[in-house]
Amino acid sequence: MIYLPTLKNLLRITGRLANNKKFHKSILSYVLACIGCLTACQQNSERKPESKSGFNLYSNEVKDTFSIYIQKPLEYEEKAKSTYPLVVVTDANFYFPMLAPIVHQFEQTGLMKPIILVGVGYDSLEKMDSLRVRDFLYPHSIASDEMQAEGGARRFQAFLANELLPGLADSLRLNTDKVLLGHSFGGYFSLLTYFEQVRSGASNFNKFVSASPTIWYNDFYLNRLTDSLKNNGKQDSTAIYLSVGGLEDSVWYVKPAEVMAEKLSSDAVKNLDCTSITYREMDHMDVGLFSFIHALKNWYKQD
């Protein structure tokens, strides 16, 4: 059994990031808002059955153990016959403690339909920094990347498809909607997973959020995959939410995201609904949480 992110942990993360010179102050306001939501959720915990759980899961594909966080809808126990969309967020050590209370708050106030939120993380926030490089990128890095990455994303994809998702399907009441959320390297992984599904004909996820993806990686490797999408009718109907911050580097983030959005929105790409947005006043670290919330609200707004 693992310990889920708590208010104390979220405060610790906030304090650490606030001292980081690269940490944009506007995202700090998001975190502080989430602390308020999390406090309210904890205060209400006596009135509702516990909706959060977590466990450690060893992957034979990756040869490592992942921390899995699960948040069920507030109504989950009361509506025993209902099924729900599954939303999987990577970088869960950072994003799950912020996103989870907002999802519950939106459900409670009628702003969004209930979803099951699952976070895939690591033993600690510190370990996440290096292990996300191992798991989210493919192929291996080249000299121009100015970083070392072994290109293990194929193994991580296999972990999700062959180990995590089947287990969740057996233990949770899921409908057919499955969403993958990723930011930065995680945003790259979301796009990579979409391209791999088109290539293989798999349908593990039908919605993707790619926030500020590192499209520059490996000399813009993802751009070389877009031709495979043209007139390829075998993929199921899919939605992609692609976002970038207007204050991000124009050469390495803004322009590549615009080019990718144009390619994905081509009439030659079948069965794909691509929404692209540039958040003009946001920098790299601002975009992830906001994109996740915006996309989920659009996809699962109440009728």
Image (tube, rainbow, N blue to C red):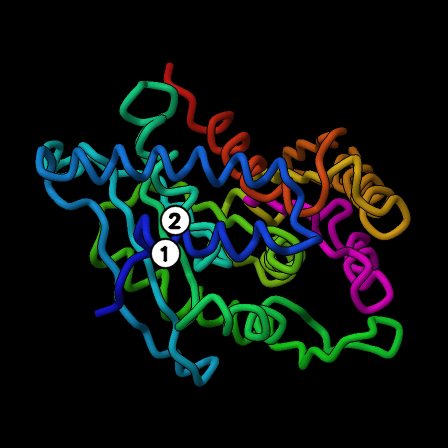
The one nearer the camera, 210 or 193, is: 210
Real-space Cα separation, disc 1 to disc 2, in angstroms? 9 Å
Give the residue type that dot 1 points to: Asn
Q: Give the SS element for disc 1.
A: helix
Sequence-first disc among 1 and 2:
1
**Residue depicted at 30% across the width and 72% down the height:** 56
Residue 254 in percent (x, y) is at: 82, 42
The one nearer the camera, 159 or 234, is: 159
Q: Give the SS element for disc 2.
A: helix
Left or right of 14, for residue 174: left
Q: Crowdedness of circle 2 by 10 Å Cα count: few (<14), some, many (20+)?
A: many
In this view, the mark in front (1 or 2) = 1
Query: Magenta includes 223?
Result: yes
In the rendered image, which residue does mark 1 sit on? 9
The one nearer the camera, 197 or 178, is: 178
**Range covered by the magenta-colored residues:** 208-233
The one nearer the camera, 122 or 36, is: 36
Residue 130 against residue 48 in the figure, above or below: below
In the rendered image, which residue does mark 2 sit on? 97
**Residue depicted at 79% across the width and 44% down the height:** 248
Residue 269 in percent (x, y) is at: 73, 41
